[in-house]
Amino acid sequence: MTVDDGDARAPGYMPMVRAIAMPADANADGDIFGGWLMSQMDLAAGNLAARAAHGRSATVAVDGMSFIRPVKVGDEVSVYCELLSTGRTSLKIAVEAWRRARGETAEQRVTKAVFTFVAIDSDGKPRPVRKTT
């Protein structure tokens, strides 16, 4: 996962989420709301957290959220995730969102952050992360 704010290449693996930014997700100037973008990132990271924790997990923190450039209506947004670390009950996941304008091939990073999740049981209480063998 890249860490600079330049136009590096998107990660070479499949995104966890892909979505098209729609008019209902934009402000009056046609820029997509940061909250919509953050929710896409949370969905993607939650997908990876569920896989890595082998079950339910909850977002407990978002660190270093950086909005680098705007997303426009019609852009394809791809969200990439990488598991950084696993604790006893927690997981840290690096998340990057990239945009591709409609009809273009070039992608640009638009947002990045580190999401922390806690594995939880059916009562919503923290539980140990099951390690794969």
Image (cartoon, rainbow, N blue to C red):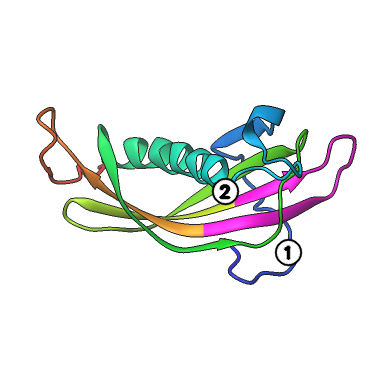
Determine whether 9 is above or below 97 in the image: below
Q: Residues within 10 Å of mark 2 (few under 14, many from 20)?
A: some
The dot on residue 40 is none
Report if residue 101 lies within the magenta region: yes
Q: Secondary structure at mark 2?
A: helix
Determine whether 105 is above or below 56 in the image: below
Q: Amino acid at mark 2?
A: Gly
User: What residue is drawn where x is 84% and y is 49%?
Assistant: 106
Which residue is label 1 attached to?
Answer: 8
Farthest front residue?
Answer: 28
Residue 6, located in which quarter of the rendered image? bottom right
User: What residue is drawn where x is 76% and y is 45%?
Assistant: 29
How many badges with numbers are in the image? Answer: 2
User: What residue is drawn where x is 21% and y is 42%?
Assistant: 119
Q: Position of residue 68 (x, y in %)?
A: 66, 62
The residues bearing labels 2 and 1 have C-alpha atoms spaced at a distance of 21 Å
Q: Is residue 101 left or right of residue 23?
A: right
Q: Position of residue 40 (x, y in %)?
A: 53, 39
Which residue is label 2 attached to?
Answer: 34
Q: Position of residue 94 (x, y in %)?
A: 47, 57
Q: Secondary structure at mark 1?
A: loop
User: What residue is drawn where x is 48% and y is 40%?
Assistant: 39
Q: Amino acid at mark 1?
A: Ala
Q: Quadrant of the C terminus?
A: top left
Q: Quadrant of the N terminus?
A: bottom right
Tell me which segment is drawn in magenta: 97-112
Q: Position of residue 83 (x, y in %)?
A: 41, 53
| Predominant SS along the magenta part | strand
Q: Is residue 36 left or right of residue 106?
A: left
